[in-house]
Image (spheres, helix red, strand yellow):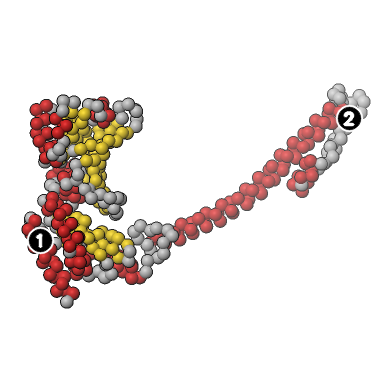
Amino acid sequence: RSHRVLRIADLLRPSALLFSPTIPAERPPQGDPRRFSADPAILQRCSCHVAKMFRFACLFLALSGATAFVAPRKLHAMNTRLAASTEKEKEEAKETTGHQVKGFPEPSAEDKAFMEALQAHQKDAPKLTFAEEIRSLVAYSNGFGVMSTNSATEEGYPSGSVVGFAVEDDGNLICSFSFMSSHTNDLLKDSRATLTVTAADFKGAADARVSIMGDCEKIPDEEREAATKKYLEKHEGAYWVQFGDFTWFRLQNIRAIRFVGGFARAGAVTPEDYAAAQPDPIAAFAAPVMNHMNEDHSDSTLAIVRHYTKLEGIDSADMVALDRLGMTVKCSRKGQFFKMRLGFPQEAKDRKNIKELLVEMTKAAAAGSA
């Protein structure tokens, strides 16, 4: 039989597939054993369909070969550009440190020098350990926190309640709950809980808070009297804890403690370190001392900060924390606020000693600026 020879050029042209003439069907002469008994019209249509299918197959192979030849080159070029971009980002990251906020102008040379000097000063500034800060925060807080429990009614969902608490000498926390409270029923079903406590002067993300995770279980009857006494020392007017439908719980078997002291100050404390630490004794009366200094002697605090840090450009300084090792001061510079730590010349022992140290530092600052 004679058939048309299909060329690649014909196959790559759409018209070759859609508008090419059909292949005529040639019938063998009469008496030839190869002669078909089928209708010639049917044979002609079948031959046409087979030819089109063959053209599609050839076109697919031709295009696949072209794609296989081109794609690796495009993929290699894309990988090269991606690698170059990644290397550029790495180089840029090496030139910057700390939190980078997009959209803000690059700090000036003066501002960079100030931040570096501040970081150098803060590196060696005396401060309490995280465990001491946590024990002090919990002991001198307002005695309320958010207790998170596993809901007894909404399976798989957490529940949160504001509860009062008091701290025992070993760091365990005691609470008195009514049987009508949802968190009481939660704890009776599942004792696992977390208590989140904020600092007494908490106002936002820049202030300290701690989360303590453990088992909150009922206190034995023989310990109820001691628990009541401890709780009423913290909450003097909480007469209702002695009502018949209230019962005592203790957050104990502490498993994890997460502390956030403010921006760039966060970490975990082991239950052992937490139990071994004690609240700072000076922090117990820090609030009235700081209020007096901030209201009547803020200029002295600013002079102390400038003298002992040697940092220039600080516009204001207010005490926000006080302990036996020093003070935490909230300062402003060019309209920006930040906290910094300033140590005492020696460790403070009591309230009288705090006054003596502040007077000494004020005189040293005045002499240094004369």
Taking 32 as reference, is 265 left or right?
left
Is disc 2 placed on a helix, strand or loop?
loop
**In this rendering, is residue 370 above or below 338?**
below
| Rendering coords of residue 331 (x, y %) | 26, 62
Q: Amino acid at mark 2?
A: Arg
Check the image and report above or below for 233 versus 99: above
Dot label at residue 42: none
Q: Residue 316 at x, y = what percent?
A: 25, 65
Residue at x 10% of width, y 61% of height: 355
Query: Is residue 253 visible from the viewing direction of this image?
Result: no
In the picture of the structure, the residue carrying the numbered disc 1 is 355
Which residue is disc 2 drawn over?
Answer: 27
- Does 117 sit above or below residue 246? below
Of residues 205 and 201, the one nearer the viewer is 201
Say if mark 1 contacts mark 2, CB within 8 Å.
Answer: no
Quarter-of-image position of residue 224: top left
Dot placed on the residue nearer the N-terminal end, 1 or 2: 2
Separation (CA) of disc 1 from disc 2: 122 Å
Q: Secondary structure at mark 1?
A: helix
Looking at the image, which residue is at 39% across and 60% down? 93
**Residue type at the position of mark 1:** Lys
Toward the bottom, the furthest residue is 370
Quarter of the image with the N terminus is top right
